[in-house]
Image (cartoon, rainbow, N blue to C red):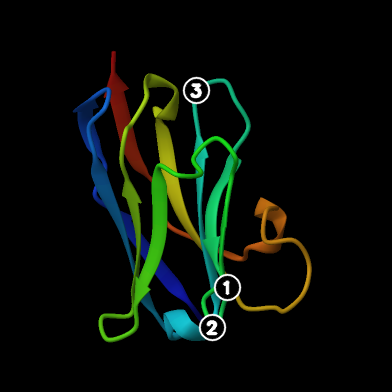
Amino acid sequence: QVRVVDSGGGFVQAGGSLRLSCAASGRTVSSATMAWFRQAPGKDREFVAAIRYGAGSTYYADSVKGRFTISRDIANNSMYLQMNSLKPEDTAVYYCAARTRIGGSYYSQYEYNYWGQGTQVTVSS
């Protein structure tokens, strides 16, 4: 059983930065593909970024490319999302997710079987 706990959200002005954290247990972060998704009020949950098991290739949504960076710390068994140049449209609840099966799309929420409780990010204009 894998457990992921996300944290680090908050309130920030446009142009500011935040770093989200995801602490994992039950499996090492290098042996599972892990991702961040977000859900804004009234909208569907959407893919933000993923880091693949093993070598750690990274994938990003076009809307965050160049501004967000996903990374992992194997020693602490944690994953992070560094968010820079934040915009009001980045306001959402952010969820850490993990998947243990191989294959399928990294971009689809339905491929992930473990989820954090979510952390709120609010960006003011």
Q: Which mark is residue 55?
A: 2
The residue tagged 1 is 52
Q: Which mark is residue 37?
A: none
Q: What SS does tag 2 mark?
A: loop
- The quadrant holding residue 4 is bottom left
Mark 2, other Cα within 10 Å: few <14 / some 14–19 / many ≥20: few
Can residue 117 be seen in the rendering of this structure?
no
Structural distance between the alpha carbons of marks 2 and 1 = 7 Å
Structural distance between the alpha carbons of marks 3 and 1 = 28 Å
Percent x, y of residue 26: 43, 84
Percent x, y of residue 46: 60, 40
Identify the residue at the far top of this view. Answer: 125
Mark 1, other Cα within 10 Å: few <14 / some 14–19 / many ≥20: many
Between discs 3 and 2, the one toward the N terminus: 3
Picture mark count: 3
Q: In which quadrant is the C terminus drawn?
A: top left
Between discs 3 and 1, the one toward the N terminus: 3
Mark 3, other Cα within 10 Å: few <14 / some 14–19 / many ≥20: few
Q: What's the residue at 60%, 25% (across, down)?
A: 43
Residue nearest the observer in this picture, 109 or 12: 12
Where is 108 relative to 92, above or below? below
Which amino acid type is marked by label 3? Pro
Which amino acid type is marked by label 2? Ala
The residue tagged 3 is 41
Can residue 85 be seen in the rendering of this structure?
yes
Circles 2 and 1 in contact, beta carbons < 8 Å: yes
